[in-house]
Structure formats: structure tokens, C-alpha cells
Amino acid sequence: MSLFRNFFIMLSNNTYLNEVAKRVGPQMGANRVVAGNTIPQLIETIQYLNDNKISVTVDCLGEFVNSKEESLSAKAQILEIIEAIHSYDVKAHMSVKISQLGSEFDLDLAYKNMREILLKADECGNMHINIDTENYDSLQKIQYVIDKLKGEFNNVGTVVQPYLYEAENLIDKYPDLHLRIVKGTYKENESIAYQTKDQIDDNYIYIIKKRLLNAHNFTSIAKHDDKIINQIKQFMKENHIEKEQMEFQMLYGFRSELAQSIANEGYHFTVYVPYGDDWFAYFMRRLAERPQNLTLAFQEFAKPKVLQKVGLCISIMSIIGAPFILATKLFKK
């Protein structure tokens, strides 16, 4: 399984594949996992989910930001989405990566950009802004930004990844922040992260239970595994934890029927909705995170008609088709 995971994480970090995928995404079925690349498309998706008792957190996709100009462009797009969410009065908030805002080359620039985003969100009904986690190397940068902002704003939160040994320290450090708990989708060394599915699942459940018992703010639980979701529901009942204290989250395009059934039970439910054309790295990490997504991906991305339509039959088959075939073989072993 680690070979499978490592393979798709490697693809997610390939800049050439990301650039090719930007150009051909719509033709290749990227709309199955991304809510378009225009504001009207995004708002339509949010309204549809809201009509089904589901809220949304919008991820404005973006990888490999290497200049101030690119970071300012990313910020401008995020501000535009915040304004649109407010103007259309839909139930949604934003998830933002500090790497999009310049943290890889200028951490203070990233902080200033994030502060401007929070000010706009505050103007727009005190909208929640979640600072997404990234790889382990970004963790200290995220905490630096969070620690500077949390005293000024009450609409900012972040993510804890229980595959990291440091996860328990983070929930202890931030009981007053709105936290999202998500397993983790990056490849990390065994010196800082659990490596097996059983280890990660065990720590995930431990972290969730500790957080729910000790939190002073809202908790978002991101998980697609119905067995673990049922364990959490049972734990909440046994410990008299109210549904108002938390929500479940899932990714847009995955396990929609399960998401709807949980929402129908009266739990708060939010779908993580990616937006934009920079979708490839995001989707490869989703495959690394959940092997069951491979079947859906192969069906959508390896259709001969799709490949012919974009005129990239040979290159796309080698870029995407061959990796899927290889990964399938690895997965069966």
C-alpha cells in the first residue's frame, strides 16, 4: 500500500504533469472532483449542496507559487470568492494554503496576505477562514501565521493531521481554535509520521476523541470511512457530546450518498469543494489518500474518446494511463 501511496504523491509533485493537466482538465473529466473554474459554476455547486443540507468549504486550488506576483494573484482570487459567497448568500467558507500566499519565499508576505483575507472575511459576515495544512516542512510556518492572527481574529482555524506524531501537541496547543482533523495526504518520513494504515487510523480515532472531550471550539472531522464515522457517532452518544459541537466533512465528488445520509441524520455536514484549473496535484493526493478512488479515476481519465478529443492520445496515456495500470497492479499485491 505504501508503494501505491508514494507513487501518486510523486505524481502530485510533478510540475510538468500539473501544467499539462491544467490545459486539458475539463475535457478529461476534472469536473467530477472540481467545481469548475468560474464564479457562476462555483456558486451553482454551492447552492446545490446547500439545498441538500450540506455546507461547503471552498479550496481555491494552487500549487507551485514562486513569486510575489503569483501570490498576489492567488490572494485576489480568494478575495473574489469570499465576496461572491457573501453576495449570493450561500452557506460556505474558505480553506486557504499559505504556500499560495508566498510562504515558501516570504513568510511575512504570506502573513500580510492572509490578514487581508481575514479582514475581508470579517467584513463579509465574519466568514470562517481555515488555514489548510500542507507537508511537514510547512507546519512551523503555519503555526507562525496562526499564532500572529488568532489574537486579532476569531474567524480563523487550521488543520491537524493525525498521521503526524505531533498531532496531539497541536490539539493541546489550540483548544480554542476551530480545527479540522484530517488523516494527512503527504509522504512523510517515519521519524515524524506513522506509516501504516492501522497506526494512522488508531491515532486518528484517539485524536478525535481527545479533541471532542476537550475542545472549546468547533471541530470538523474529515473522513470517508463509514466504520470510523460510526465509531465517532457512538463515542459522541456515550459521552453526551452534542452534534452542535462538530461536523463531518468529505471531499467533493466522493461518497456523495454517504454524505447525504449523514446530513439527513441531523449532523452538520460540509463538503470540501476545490475550485480552479490547478486540479492535478490535488487529485493525485486524493488517490494516494484513498485507493478506492482509483477505479473512478481510471474510468474518467482513460476514456479513448476523451483522449482523442484533446489530441493528446499518446502523451496522456503515458502520463496518466500507464501510472494507473501500474498502480492497480501494486494495489492488488
Image: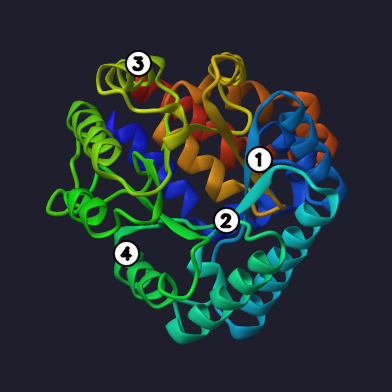
Q: Above or below — where is 332 with respect to 31?
A: above
Residue 221 x/y as whole percent: 41, 35
Residue 85 x/y as whole percent: 76, 52
Q: Dot 1 corresponds to which residue?
A: 316
Is the residue under label 1 in contact with that under label 4 (CB below 8 Å)? no
Q: Above or below — where is 109 with respect to 45?
A: below
Q: Dot 4 corresponds to which residue?
A: 139
- What's under tag 1, amino acid-wise? Ile
Camera-side residue of 110 and 242 = 242
Looking at this rendering, what residue extends furthest in the left direction? 191
How crowded is the residue under tag 4: few (<14 C-alpha within 10 Å), some, or many (20+)? some
**Closer to the N terminus: mark 4 or mark 1?**
4
- What's under tag 2, amino acid-wise? His
For the N terminus, the image quarter is top left
Q: Above or below — where is 100 with respect to 194?
A: below
Camera-side residue of 175 and 62 = 175
User: Gap between marks 4 and 1, in whole Å?
Assistant: 34 Å
Residue 310 x/y as whole percent: 81, 41
User: Gap between marks 3 and 1, in whole Å?
Assistant: 24 Å
Camera-side residue of 138 and 14 = 138
Q: Dot 3 corresponds to which residue?
A: 332
Identified at 45% across, 82% down, the residue is 105
- What's under tag 3, amino acid-wise? Lys
Please state which of the two labelled residues, at mark 3 or mark 1, is closer to the viewer. 3
